[in-house]
Amino acid sequence: MRLSPRGPARWLLYHALPRDEREFILQELDEVAARRFGGQGLGARLWYLRQTAVFAARFLNERRRELLDRSRQRQYDRDDPLGKREPAMTGLVRDISFALRLLAKQPGFAAVVVLTLALGIGPNSAIFSVVNGVLLRPLPYEEPEQLALIRIDLSGLQAHPGIARAEVLDFRHQAEALADVGAVTREFIANLTGGDRMEAGLGASVTPNLFPMLGIRPIVGRAFRPIEETADQPPVAIIGHGLWQRRFGGDPQIVGRETEINNRMVEIVGVLPEGFRLLLGPGTSLSPDVDVWFPLVLDPEDRGFWAYRAIVRMAPGVSIEQAEREVKAVGAGLVADNPDTYDSSGIAFYLHPLHNDLVQDVRPAILVLFGAVALVLMIACTNAASLLLARMKSRERELALRAALGAHRSRIIRQVLIESLVLAMAAGVFGLALGTYGLRGLLALQPGNLPRIDDIALDPTVLAFTLVASFAASLIFGLVPAWQASRPEMQGALKVGVQHQSGLRARTRGAMVVAQVAFCVMLLIGAGLLVRTFASLRGIDLGFSPDSVLTMRAAMNTQEFSDPEARWEVWRQFTARIAELPGVSEVGGISLVPLGNQGMIASYGVGDDLDTDWNGTSADYRFVLPGYFESMGMRLISGRAFDDGDNQQLTPVAIIDESLAAQAWPGEDPVGRQIAIGLGTALNDDESEESPRAEVVGVVTHIRGIDIRRQVRPQIYLPYRASPRSSMFLTVRASGEPASVAEGIRDQARALGLGRPVHTVRTMRSYVDAAMSGARFTLTLMATLAGIALLLSTIGVYSVVAYLVRQRTRETGIRLALGAERADIVRLNLREGMVMTAIGVPIGLVGALFFARSFEALLFGVAATDPYTFLGIPLLLLAVTAVASWLPARRATRVDPLVALRSE
Amino acid sequence: MPRDALGEIEQLVLLAILRLDNGAYGVPIVEEIRERTGRNVSRAAVYIALRRLRGKGLVTSWLTDPEPVPGGRAKRFFRVEPEAIARLAEVRETFMSMWEGLAPTLKRHSG
């Protein structure tokens, strides 16, 4: 009967055994395993692994011995009777087999060291996967380093990712440093209504040159043609691979098929490759899950909407600096030629390399975490070194014997280093497994703002990194014990009873604990600062109360409901019916839900500015249905909310937020004042509405935006009827569980015959959580790492104090015999641990100052040098190490003086 | 020690085979040694000792018929050669002569 652990263990054994022995020995091992364990189960596997290690080691050694005998015989024959030279490889094999045998004899020790190191290597492996996937791997496009995104500063906006269509053409024609310029819109809803099932997908429009520019070719059909960039072309679309499979069953005849999208019959001309995503940086509002692509028509007259994300390919040999200079030059020319378009604050163009742009927001956090895991690895290595040093004591005689027999110092160092290497490699394997599971757990935290999550995986680069990290770890933790083991003073160990080695060993171990404590302080302070940051974030006044609020997107068939009044009537009825549903306390609606999307932006003018210059002002504006503010729990500060009677055509009205009120009319009540809203120069791609002036009828609380740390532009609300749209986000405040009302709302939508599916059903709380997910991710990680560090350091302190206690057994016996109090003994030993901590803490505090400064950008509501954290953490650590020192110290008092005096 | 002297484990292996009616394979040899000496001698060391003894010609091996079960294989049994028995006797003589008369001394020092 063959034992199940085939595979690596058996392979190793098979090849380590001599040809004429292997079959019989393996067979007999199987027999023993069957007898003892029934041949299956964990016990059998572990026993088999152990046997493999021992057999492999011994038989390899035996082979070496046989080779040596033969070579000695040859050398003897060649008149070299001493035969001193030893074939090099056999020495290495001997060392490895010796190391394996030694570790197999002390499986407990080996397991502890391997586990300790794995706790250090694992997190490194996991975080490196993130570094690799997000920061290092080039984007999946052709020559991605030549791609860049244009951003602008304009009118109170900074680093806005869109330009106007005319400008796209201008750059294309005028900038010679740019080989090509393409553009893409933000995403929009693509209602797929053809066929038996309605589906709300995501769509976007791209210039025909964009996919070829990225090196992306459809796997079926064709790309867009250049002519499709002009108006009045038959409607066509290219779909994503996922949609092709999902909705069209991967139909090989898909090219030329027509389907209804957003109320138009569209011909599908191509399918994109599987896994294609257009990855753009923050603020671009383009999801990686866009299913349908339409050709973007570039209107050379359109200078007014800065809503088109422009991706450029730099000409070969052109650097980013050169390209940016040229872009700025062209931009300056545009401003000069079109004075009416750009107000006097002008417009500034920038060029960001595409990859940089994508990761700029998350790079600081990732690098900080990478630094943190490096610290954890250092702690793990010092722990392992400390353990190895402790074990050196039991090998003193063996090593001294070797030295006496003529082994060169370098041989001994090599032997110990190879033991370290074997341990480190085993730890590398476990660490990799740990890291893989850890990574899965990490990504399950859903760090919403982490781009390229799909690119984070265990690939050859990560494996190579883990190998290198394990190797480096083995050097780091093996060097000191190796050097110590080889010192000439070891000779003294041959004489029984001499103890002077232990003094040096103890001091070295003590120094290692000091280092561990210092690293630990750094990590704990980092975690502490992030905890406080997270607490501050959670405590932010969002301006509304997100709990118990459900949001969803509802839409109506635009052809069936084309009359604005008809649309208004539908919303009125819809919201009225929803209000009657059980469990619903308030209902409202808004054009774009806050925290979910980049809003629509307009300039505004107040007071004397009404007619002219709206320099540097910009505000978010949204259209709302009555009941919105109540449903969101927003406080009405003065005036009133909108009601059914607000018809924009008759008496234009607006509601502003408190920050606009404070800016425009500080100290006064703005109700009754006039405000002009420049929708004509809006930075969105919506239909332009003329709504020059409105009367302020109410002031509400300010709402935080997507990055909840930063103050956002002031907010203006206009009544729905100012721009009657067919699609709105509904906001429903429930008296119980928000999710429970969803079905009822869908039923009402069907009953009213809206003709479009209700989708994107989410609680407001989920939007808030998503906004904080980045901070939560970093915090969770850092806290975990700090926890590992604390555990390892505590074990480090404990084991060193325990070691010292053991060393002092004789001395303790003498003291007790001479009348010392047990409490004195405890105090003496306790002091050892506390002294190490007391030295390590100040060093760690200094390190923490630098460490904390490096991630100042991640902090919120707390300074990088926050005194509470810097004081609290050392106290915490002192308390923990006090306990870790007290436990072994207390055991010292249990010593029987007579026994102690007799011990060596 | 001269090159072909009998090591301790080699002696134990030879004696074990003899105790097993001068015909045994690896598994019972290990068990016999462990039972009689009470030491957890390394299984791998026993196999290596068998190999060395074969190399020195002190044991020989033969294959039995395959076991009468599906997938049964032949086992390799060992027997001790007369020369080995003579050497064992030599070793015994050597140690017995050194031990002679030392029993009381031993008793004193282990008190």
Image: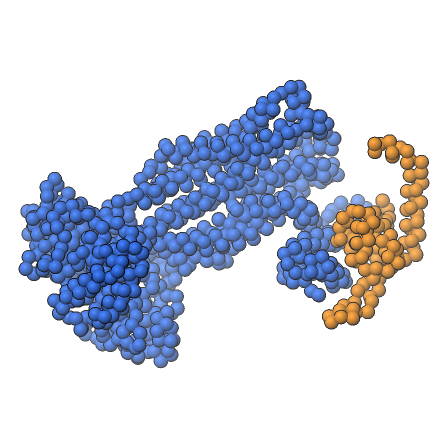
Chain colours: A blue, B orange
Residue at horizontal 59 percent and vertical 32 percent from the top: A888
Give A374 or A892, whichever is nearer the viewer. A892
Which residue is the extreme one toward the front? A582
Residue A275 visible somewhere in the drawing: yes
Above or below, A826 against A379 in this view is above
Q: In terms of image quadrants, where is residue B111?
A: top right
Left/right placement of residue A616 relative to residue A608 reads right
In this rendered view, identify the residue nearer to me: A516 or A303: A516
Q: Is B62 positioned to the left or the right of A850 in the image?
A: right
Count of numbered marks: 0
State the residue lying farthest toward the top.
Answer: A818
Q: Residue A155: horizontal and vertical position, in percent?
A: 17, 50
A894 vs B3, nearest the viewer: A894
Residue A220: x %, y % from top left: 36, 75
Compare residues A404 and A24 and report the one nearer the observer.
A24
Q: Is residue A166 visible?
A: no
Q: In the rendered image of this protein, does residue A420 appear above or below residue A164?
A: above
At horizontal 26% and vertical 75% (from top left) the residue drawn is: A260
The C terminus of chain A lies in quadrant: top right
Q: Position of residue B32 (x, y in %)?
A: 82, 53
**Horizontal placement of A384 versus A574: left or right?**
right
Q: Residue at x 44, y 31 (%)?
A: A875
Screen quadrant of the N terminus of chain A = bottom right
| Residue drawn at the location 50% of the way across and 52% of the way down | A435
The x and y percentages for residue B49 are: 80, 53
